[in-house]
Image (cartoon, grey):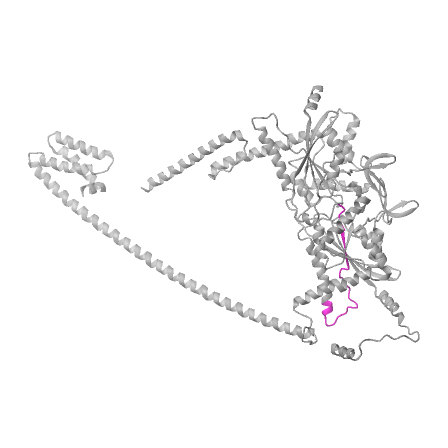
Amino acid sequence: PNQVHRKSVKKGFDFTLMVAGESGLGKSTLVHSLFLTDLYKERKLLSAEERISQTVEILKHTVDIEEKGVKLKLTIVDTPGFGDAVNNSECWKPITDYVDQQFEQYFRDESGLNRKNIQDNRVHCCLYFISPFGHGLRPVDVGFMKALHEKVNIVPLIAKADCLVPGEIRKLKERIREEIDKFGIHVYQFPECDSDEDEDFKQQDRELKESAPFAVIGSNTVVEAKGQRVRGRLYPWGIVEVENQAHCDFVKLRNMLIRTHMHDLKDVTCDVHYENYRAHCIQQMTSKLTQDSRMESPIPILPLPTPDAETEKLIRMKDEELRRMQEMLQKMKQQMQDQ
Amino acid sequence: MAATDLERFSNAEPEPRSLSLGGHVGFDSLPDQLVSKSVTQGFSFNILCVGETGIGKSTLMNTLFNTTFETEEASHHEECVRLRPQTYDLQESNVQLKLTIVDAVGFGDQINKDESYRPIVDYIDAQFENYLQEELKIRRSLFDYHDTRIHVCLYFITPTGHSLKSLDLVTMKKLDSKVNIIPIIAKADTISKSELHKFKIKIMGELVSNGVQIYQFPTDDEAVAEINAVMNAHLPFAVVGSTEEVKVGNKLVRARQYPWGVVQVENENHCDFVKLREMLIRVNMEDLREQTHSRHYELYRRCKLEEMGFQDSDGDSQPFSLQETYEAKRKEFLSELQRKEEEMRQMFVNKVKETELELKEKERELHEKFEHLKRLHQEEKRKVEEKRRELEEETNAFNRRKAAVEALQSQALHATSQQPLRKDKDKKNRSDIGVQQSGMSLSSSKVMMTKASVEPLNCSSWWPAIQCCSCLVRDATWREGFL
């Protein structure tokens, strides 16, 4: 295990995280709190009339951070404009296209000749921010999650949790869990821990599972509370501490995401989602080929990795020739019958 | 009538003179009479709450009026926005209030929110329409009429901290000319003081730059001018609503209890709830009603009547009579109707004629075709007949030739030299060569010929030859070659 440790430290890790949700729910603040880095130095926020017919963009920020010799290449994929326009039908389409694109690129790289330096840009985890001002999931939330749950690990979060008293938080979490079941959305499930782990760990794991979806609060500012400097939000009636477990689930989220489950998220992405995509892609290709030879329709251009393209072209040409010969034969037969 | 009287008066006296009273007359109690009358009559007030589901509209209503209006929680999955009006009768120290709260259910939930504002605008217009109808009635009872026009619209803004949402902007623009809008920041316990300040400035800036007219508290009445001016600067109010009571110090106050503190609803430092209550209920309710009636309702009425074709009296100074204009309009309308009916009937008749013509044409065409086909058929028949006759002739010719050949045969039997036979056979050969037939019969006949040429002539060698000739005759090809 030591050797593996040393090797992985040398190689460094990479992690791609996507944040999605309506504007103003605190996505960038939370990212800032999680990784303690400011990614959005000069950000232009659009005013309301500009956002009436806003389209969703995909922005990528990559940072290299290091802690105790372990390097992490962190990519944050942001989705500004999601849910902002007045008409939000299919507003998740650019996002699904982006995820598919990353998969496709990886697929192509994998089937390529030079596999030493593959860049893994696949999205490992998607944090979806649910608005706390409602009674549960909204139609746009449901639509988004259903479009993406088979492609990415979705971790739902309740944003801006400092507007809910503890009783309300509990009710909302239950509500959201029910609705997730009702609509059949597959969010990321924490893996079961082994039975030979110690009791403490198991307890933690259980708590983690019970508090999903996490109710989080983010903050960029440090305030003084009880003589200590903590990160939090200052209100006239009190100070909300971000890292206080009794105040919000931020600590649980951070532990889960970075300290314990990062690798699991990556594994699930590789094993489950990527395999699904790959199988689906290959199936599509083969079914298209058989369809073509039967229907004699023009063969569509398939998204194939380059080395096989040559052979495919040859096969296609031969197919066409065969077809032409067949047609000619038929014509001659008919002529002879007429005679 | 009235206009001309006034004119005479004003011509006689330039303006009313102000006189001073000698003693106490007593008409200074007019306002009191008005007050007591209004109190016995009771007031009515209609509030429209527009905001996303779950933003706290019902809670705020409960908090404002200190009672519990039973409203069930709305779900997020409504198909479209609908309005739910509920009327309550409240009483506070012998003043009665008929309060109607209209809730916009499902606002902001749909994925496509293009038409979200429409049901709201339609509802407001419908209320105006009802009032207009009541006004225009011949026997009307405005005294008793339950006024359902919306006096104020509380627009709940989501506390994102950045700016207004696009949906908010679009909706407010549509509503600002129909109703008094007071924007409110809901769930304000999620924004800290500094953020709140920035947020308010941003919102007001956006509203102004987009030309949205929100309700400004009136500053012309000295009694309330000062306080109103101050309040105007605090728009939009950031409120927190709560119906639960929490013990703070040694009092029970309405508040929300968090692990990190308690947000008191009636504490000015914590939120602007008190300001809102002051403004809405204690100070300006009457002004809101007034504005609704004088500004928004009049605007609606003017548009509607103009639509119907009425206009105020223009240059000819004839007094404007609703009745006459109405009659004239009616006549016009009826004559229009009649004209249209005629037109339609005419069109219908024309169409029928056209279709008849078309049908006739088609019939004619069909007849022609039939004739044509018949003629063709007859021609074909004739040709076939001709061919048959030709065939018969040829068979006759052939029979004759056959007879001739047989005669020749019998002659040749007596002849000694093979030359003439050979000549015949050559002839037959040549005719055979002309034939494109598959090899069998040809070769066999050739063989026979050669055989025959070698051996001395006898009947046995000829018969096969003749047989071949006859089978050749059965095929048409021989005939061609022969001919």
Q: Residue at x 80, y 47 (%)?
A: B197
User: x%, y% of residue A225?
Assistant: 86, 36
Residue B25, picture quadrant: bottom right
Residue nearest the viewer, comparing A196 with A80: A80
**Quadrant holding the C terminus of chain B:** top left
Q: Which of A9 and B135 is in front in this view?
A: A9
Q: Is residue B349 above or below residue A45?
A: below
Residue B36 in sight in this render = yes
When the figure is inspected, residue A289 is found, relative to residue A115, above or below; the finding is: below
Is A316 covered by the magenta stretch?
Answer: no
Is B49 situated left or right of B381 in this image? right
- Left or right: B26 as drawn, with respect to B406: right
Farthest-out residue, top: A3
Horizontal relation, residue A333 to residue B335: left or right: left
Q: Where residue B192 appears, x then y in whole percent?
A: 81, 43
The stretch drawn in magenta includes residue B156: yes
Q: Is residue B67 visible?
A: no
| Residue extent of the magenta highlight | B133-160
Q: What kind of secondary structure does the magenta stretch mostly adopt? A: loop
Residue A147 location, x and y as percent?
64, 40
Q: Is B95 above or below relative to A125?
A: below
x and y, in percent, of residue A240 in the image: 82, 39
Where, by quadrant of the figure, is residue A41 drawn?
Answer: top right
